[in-house]
Amino acid sequence: MRQRLIPKRFLPKHLQIVKKLKLSQPTFEYLNSLPIHLKKSVRAVAVYYRTGEISSKGVRSFVKKNVPQLQFKNPAVQFVMFKNLKEIPTIRIFCEDGNHLMLDAESKNSLKIIEEIKRIAAKPDTQVAREQQEVLPNPANFGDRRAGQRLCICEVPGQVPCPKYVPMLNVKHEWKEKKETAV
């Protein structure tokens, strides 16, 4: 049975608005595309903006598009958004030593906000590259041989051999034979 689509004019107003606000899918490539790793001293980021003002337009787009990317790259940092709490849109970055940095985000687009965050609170690219080289691959991962991963657990020393190379013993069958010979 074929489903019929409901014309837009028959949808309730709240469903029409949701369709207009739909963003791109948060795929792995999308989340990984922003190359900003915050410093280890950064513990929280608070974003203050107003919902209806033109001066907060860049901050609203930053919250919708770039905050998920920052959260993905920095899982140890807490991100908090406050709507309609302050008159001027600002971003506060809290450090572990008790200091905080305040960025003025009034009438700035999301690209300028990202550049300021990168300039003030991000690790240098050389440090990020050095940290990525230091990370060793997890030996529990399986999959692609080209990436240096194992295809099967039987390749690990001390594990049960793969049944395609060595026939498995039928434990139940051996147990029954021993029981019959004992009787």
Image (spheres, rainbow, N blue to C red):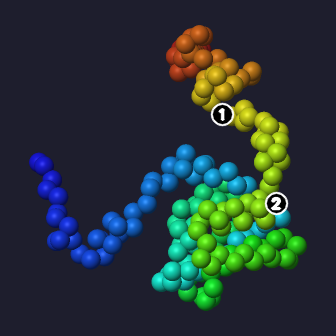
Question: Could you tell me the amino acid type at mark 1?
Answer: Asn
Quadrant in the rendering for residue 104: bottom right
Quadrant in the rendering for residue 169: top right
The residue under the point 23% across, 75% down is: 12
The residue under the point 17% across, 58% down is: 5
Q: How far across and how far down the image is residue 57, in percent?
A: 52, 75
Question: What residue did someone put label 1 on?
Answer: 141
Q: Nearer the viewer, residue 144 or 50?
A: 50
Name of the residue lying farthest toward the left? 1
Say whether residue 140 is left or right of residue 9: right
Q: Is residue 121 above or below residue 129?
A: below
Tell me the tag on residue 5: none
Q: SS at mark 1?
A: loop
Quadrant in the rendering for residue 13: bottom left
Q: How far across and how far down the image is residue 8, in percent?
A: 20, 67
Sort mark 2 into few (<14), some (14-19) or many (20+) by Cα contacts within 10 Å. some
Q: SS at mark 2?
A: loop
Total number of numbered discs in the rendering: 2
Q: Is residue 48 above or below residue 41?
A: below
Q: How far across and how far down the image is residue 36, in percent?
A: 70, 55
Q: Are marks 1 and 2 in contact (CB under 8 Å)?
A: no
Name of the residue lying farthest toward the right? 97
Q: Is residue 19 above or below residue 91?
A: above
Question: What residue did someone put label 2 on?
Answer: 40
Q: How far across and how far down the image is residue 47, in percent?
A: 64, 76
Sort mark 1 into few (<14), some (14-19) or many (20+) by Cα contacts within 10 Å. few
Q: Is residue 181 above or below residue 50?
A: above
